[in-house]
Image (spheres, rainbow, N blue to C red):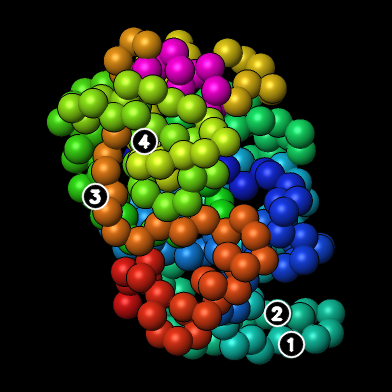
Amino acid sequence: MKTVILCGGMGTRIRDAGENLPKPLLPIGGKPILWHIMMGYAHHGFNDFVLCLGYKGWLIKEFFLNYRAMSSDLQVTLGPHGTTEFLGRPLDEDWRVLLADTGEATMTGGRLTAIRKYVEADDLVMCTYGDGVANIDVTQLVAFHRAHGKVATVTAVRPPGRFGELSVAAGTVAEFNEKPQSAGGLINGGFFVFDPRRLWNYLPPDAECILEAEPMRALVRDRQLVAYEHAGFWQPMDTLREFNLLNDLWSSGRAPWKTWE
């Protein structure tokens, strides 16, 4: 089962934290927020990732191409028969990472369509945003999705009301409103699970398709979107204040999303 992470946005509201970096590379405690998200999935044994790249995606490619070198001691032998040796114990991160260029201006639904060929043979696929952390038990999330058998599961959380608001009745999503003017109750927290055999019925092959707009509303109309309610920690990183909050939590040793050792 693959985990798709949407890494293509420009992050215009958080430029003060890193003018030259795509938002998924902004550091929390010296590691990109993307790394923290991936560690959360890997802790549950989900190590197969597809990253949907867009804005400054080459920097994310460079991060992973240089990952081992940046995480190890090196011994470099120069000269015509030069070699590079990685010293110390092997990396703990036993990950497979597919880095897919999905277009700088592509919307969230379009990014998923762009990587269809990489995930459509799987029985399920997970998906989340590259700018938010949580202490979600993704093993339990997948089991919940398998139990209800619908096309899609969205994780519903309860922070500030500037995100997509969900109306939930008996577990099934009854309404999906993206970023209302004022909101209360449950909101879209990402951490989706999809049935890739049926998902494409709701995603047109259009780079301008926004996952959180008509595709989600169509899933709601067909009663194919179910909410997994998460009462634990969830925090996006959309602003400088939120960037500082997450770094303060990490540096104080009180990072609730750190479920790994």
State which region is magenta. 211-220
**Amino acid beneath label 3:** Thr
**Residue 130 x/y as whole percent:** 56, 51
Q: CA distance from mark 3 to mark 2?
A: 42 Å
Mark 3 Cα shell of 10 Å, populated few (<14), some (14-19), many (≥20): few
Mark 3 or 4, closer to the camera: 4
Above or below: residue 216 compared with residue 192? above
Determine which quarter of the picture holds residue 86: bottom right
Which sits earlier in the primary sequence, circle 3 or circle 2?
2
**Residue 249 x/y as whole percent:** 46, 78
Residue that label 1 marks: 77
One can see residue 65 in this view: no
Q: Residue furthest front?
A: 182
Q: CA distance from mark 4 to mark 2?
A: 48 Å
Residue that label 4 marks: 154
Which sits earlier in the primary sequence, circle 1 or circle 3?
1
Residue that label 2 marks: 83
Secondary structure at badge 4 equals strand
Residue that label 3 marks: 139
Mark 3 or 2, closer to the camera: 3
